[in-house]
Amino acid sequence: MSRFLTVGAAQMGPIARHETRASTVKRLMELMKEAKSFNCDIVAFPELALTTFFPRWPIEDENELDSFYETEMPSPATRPLFNLASELGIGFSLGYAELEIRNGIKRRFNSSVLVDKTGNITGKYRKIHLPGHADVLDRPGQHLEKRFFEVGDFGFPVFHAFGAIMGMCICNDRRWPETYRVMGLQGVEMVLLGYNSPVGLGDPYELDALEPFHNHLVMQSGAYQNATWVVGVAKAGCEEGFNMIGQTCIIAPSGEIVAMCCTMGDELVIRKCDLDMAKPYRADIFNFSAHRRPEHYTLITARTGAVKPPESD
Ligand code: ING
C-alpha cells in the first residue's frame, strides 16, 4: 500500500524592499488556500519568504537591518498564516531571517520551519552553506550572507512528520552533495528547500548562462543519489532590479522533474507524491548498507587523504 503526500510548491515573485509583512503574509495565505483547494497536505514556500533578499545590500543601519528579521516564530505578522494552516488542515515550510537574542547577544540565521497541519512547528533548520562574502562590495549583485547570517548550528536533521521522514535545506545548501547525503543517511523521503538565486553573480558570464541548468542539476542529482523527493521553491523575477531565477519544481526519487513553474511570479505547482516510489532505488542501486558501508568512507578518505586544493591563480 503506497503512502502519498500531496505537495504544493509555492513560488513567489519579487518582494520589494519596503513591502510590509502584512502584504507578503497575504500572498502566502493566498497560495496556501490555493494549495488546499487542490487537497495539498503541505505547501512549501521559498527562502526568506517574508522579505526581499536584503543581503544584496551592505545595510549599515542596525535598526533597518533588524527590520528584515523575525525575533519570534510565529511572529504577530505571521500568526495569521499559522492560524490559516490549522483552520485548513495543511502543513507548510517557510524560510525567514531569524534574530535570536542569546545571552544578550544578537544571533542571526537564515532559517526555515516545518509546520504541521495543526499549525505547530515540528521542525527547524538554519542554513549552513552561506555563499558570497562578508565585505566585497564592488559587485553588481552582492551576496553578503556571510555578513548578515551565522552558519547554521542544527546540522541537517530529519523530521518524522506527515507520515514521512522530512528534511529541509536552504538555497546554496542544495549545491552541495553532503546536504542530501547527510539526510539520506537518515532515511529522508522528501527534502523541502527554498531559494533566492540571482540569474548570475555577474561574472564569469559562462557560469551565469548555465545557472538555470545548474539549479536543476544539483536538485535532480541530490534526489536520485539519495532516493528522495526534492521540492525546490524559488523567489523569482526581477526583485529590486536583480533578476532571480524561477523554475520552482518537484523532483521524484528517480531524478525526474514531475512539476515545474513557468512564470516568474506567485505560482503554485502540485504533485501527489508516492513516497514508496523510492523503494526500488533504496533496495538495489542505492542500498547504502550493501554498497556504501562506513568502512568504504574510511577507505576512500584514507586513500585520498587531505588533498591540497590546486593553487588558485
Ligand atoms: N543564492 C545563490 C545560490 O546558491 C549563488 C548564490 C548564485 C551561488 C549563483 C552560485 C551561483 O543559489 C543563495 N541565496 O544561496
Image: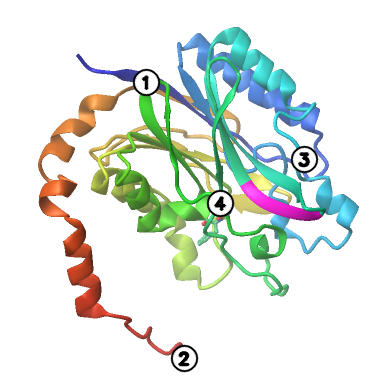
Verify CB contact (< 8 Å) between mark 3 and mark 4.
Answer: no
Region in magenta: 105-110
Q: Residues within 10 Å of mark 3 (few under 14, many from 20)?
A: some
**Residue 109 lies in the magenta stretch:** yes
- Estimate the spatial distance between the alpha carbons at disc 3 and disc 4, rounded to whole Å: 17 Å
The residue to which callout 3 is attached is 71
Sequence-wise first label, 2 or 1: 1
**Residue hosting label 1:** 163
Q: Residues within 10 Å of mark 4 (few under 14, many from 20)?
A: many
Counting other residues with Cα less than 10 Å from the Cα at mark 1, is it few (<14), some (14-19), or many (20 or more)? few
Q: Are marks 2 and 4 in contact (CB under 8 Å)?
A: no
Residue tagged 2: 313
- Disc 3, disc 1: CB below 8 Å? no
Q: In the image, 19: left or right of 15?
A: right
CA separation in Å, label 3 and label 1: 30 Å
Residue 201: % across, % down? 57, 65
Looking at the image, is mark 2 or mark 4 nearer the viewer?
A: 4
Pointer 4: what residue?
A: 127
Q: Is mark 4 within 8 Å of ligand 1?
A: yes
At label 2, the amino acid type is Asp
Who comes first in sequence, dot 3 or dot 2?
Answer: 3
Q: Residue at x 65, y 47 (%)?
A: 238
